[in-house]
Amino acid sequence: MLSTKRRRLVIILLALLGLSSLAAATYLFAQAPYTLYDGDTAVTLNGRYATVGDLLDAAGVSLRPEDGVTPPRDAPAPPGGAIQIERARPVSVRTEEAARTLWTRQPTLGAFLLEAGIRVQRADQIFADGRALPFGALDTAPLPATLEIGRFHTITIQDGDQRQVVRTAAQTVGAALQETGVTVYAADGVTPPLGAWLTPNLTIEIKRSKPLTLVVDGRVIQTRSHHANALDVLAEAGVGLIGFDYTRPGPETLLKPDDVITVVRVTEDFVTVDQPIPFQTLHQANAELALDTQAVVSYGTPGIQRQRLRVRYENGVEVSRTVDGEWMAQAPVNQVIGYGTQINLGVVDTPQGPREYWRVVRMRVTSYTAASSGRAPNDPRYGITASGRPAGTGVVAADRAVVPFRSEVFVPGYGVGFVGDTGGGVRGRWIDLGYDEDEFVSWSGYVDVYYLTPVPPPDKINYLLPQALP
C-alpha cells in the first residue's frame, strides 16, 4: 500500500518538473531579441509583439508611405528574426508645369521616372543634381537629389516698341535675355524678374528707365527709374512718406522723362485761440430808485470761448487752420442793473389849471388829422380811433408799451391829450398829436410828455422804457 502511494508521488513530481521546464522554454522563446535594421543602424529590442507594426511602434519608428519594411507591417513579428527598413529618398523635381518633391526607393533615375510616370522626350534638357545628363544615360544614372527637366521654350521679348519672338533652352528670364543679346540696366524694369523660370509662351516685358529729378527735404536728387508713378519712384529711391506727406505730381499722374517729383512734407501743430463771450445785462427792480433812473448793481464779466486749432504746415509753411475742438474756458458773469420803481408825483400848469403828474418822458412828436390817418372818407372806420373816439384835437396816438392806453398826458404847447389812438407806425418813445382839420398844427422834433394822474396799477406800468428816441 505504501509503495503505491510513493509511486503516485514520484509521478506527480515528475509531471510538475516537466511543466516547469516547458514554461521556462516558452518564456525564453517569447523573450528572444528582435533586430531592427534601419539603413546602417541596427536596433535590438526585447519583448513580445504580435506584428511587425507593433514592433515598429514600440521602437518609435515612423515611416513614410513610400518606405519599405520586410516583413511587412501586418506580418507576425518573427522572434529572434531581423526586420529590414528601406527608406525612400526625396527627389526635388522641377518641370515646366510645377516644382514638387517625390519620394522613392528606386536606385536609378530611369526606374524613378518610370515609377513617377514622368515622360522625358529626347529633346528635353535634363539636369541631375545640377549636371546635364544625356537622354541615353537615364536608365543607368543613379537617383539624384534634384532633377530639372526643361524643354526649348518659345518666348516673346517686348523691349519698348521693339518686339522679338525667340526659342531658347535657357531656364530663367535673365539667361534668356543674355542669350538673345538684350542688355538691361539696374534701373530698368523686367517682368517677370530676371531670376524667374521660363514657361511656355512667356512674354518678357522690359521697361526702360527714364531720367527724373526728386526734390525732397531741401535736396535735389537726379535719378533714373522705369516706374510710371511718383510713389514707386520714391520707394525705389528709399524716400519715405510719413503721415500726410504727399507728392507733386500725385501717383495718378503718369511720369515722363525729365519730370520733377516734389515731396511735400506735411506736419501739424495745435494752438489755442480765445474768443470773448459777451455777458448779458439783467434788470432788477429797485424801490429805492426813482422811476426812470438806473444804477449798476453788479458789473458783468465777459466769458472765454476757447478753440483748439489744428495748424497744417507744408514744407514748413502754414497753409491752413481748422477747428479741432471748442469749449467754454470761462463762463460769463451777467451784469445786473437796478431800475427805479419809486414814483414821485409832481404838478404842472396846464391851460385847464394845475395837474398832477407821475412821470415825464422825452419823446419824438408829430401831428395828424383824420384825413392823414390813411383811411378813405367813405371807410366806415374813417376818423375813428382805436379807443372808439373820433380823431381830432385832444386825442393823441402813442405806443401802448410806452404810454398807458386811455390815460391822459400833457404836452406843452398842445395841452392835455387823451391817449385814445395807437397809430400804425407810432412805436417807442413817439407821440402823434391829433387835430381837427381846421385847427391842424404841424409838429416835429422832440417834446417832454407828462403822464397825468391817476397812477396806473404797477402791472400796467412799463418801468423800462426804450432808451433810444425814434
Image (tube, rainbow, N blue to C red):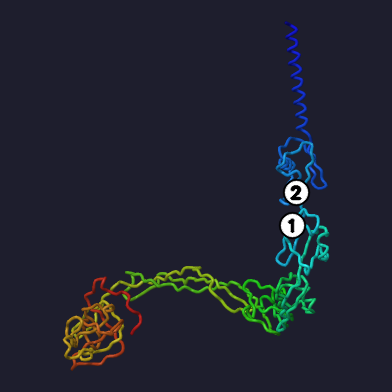
Give the label on residue 191, or none: none
Q: Residue at 68% x, 81% y: name it.
A: 261
Give the label on residue 115, or none: 1
**Structural crowding at the residue carrying mark 1, measured as other residues with C-alpha within 10 Å and reported as few (<14), some (14–19) or many (≥20):** few
* Distance (Cα) linking label 2 and label 1: 15 Å
Between 2 and 49, which is closer to the camera in this rendering?
2
The C terminus lies in which quarter of the figure? Answer: bottom left
Q: Residue at 70% x, 66% y: name it.
A: 97
Residue annotated with mark 2: 68
Between 199 and 331, which is closer to the camera in this rendering?
199
**Structural crowding at the residue carrying mark 2, measured as other residues with C-alpha within 10 Å and reported as few (<14), some (14–19) or many (≥20):** some
Q: Residue at 73% x, 8% y: name it.
A: 4
Q: Which of marks 2 and 1 is nearer the N terminus?
A: 2
Amino acid type indicated by mark 1:
Glu
Between 261 and 443, which is closer to the camera in this rendering?
261
Q: Residue at 78% x, 72% y: name it.
A: 170
Amino acid type indicated by mark 2:
Gly
Q: Is residue 442 above or below residue 209?
A: below
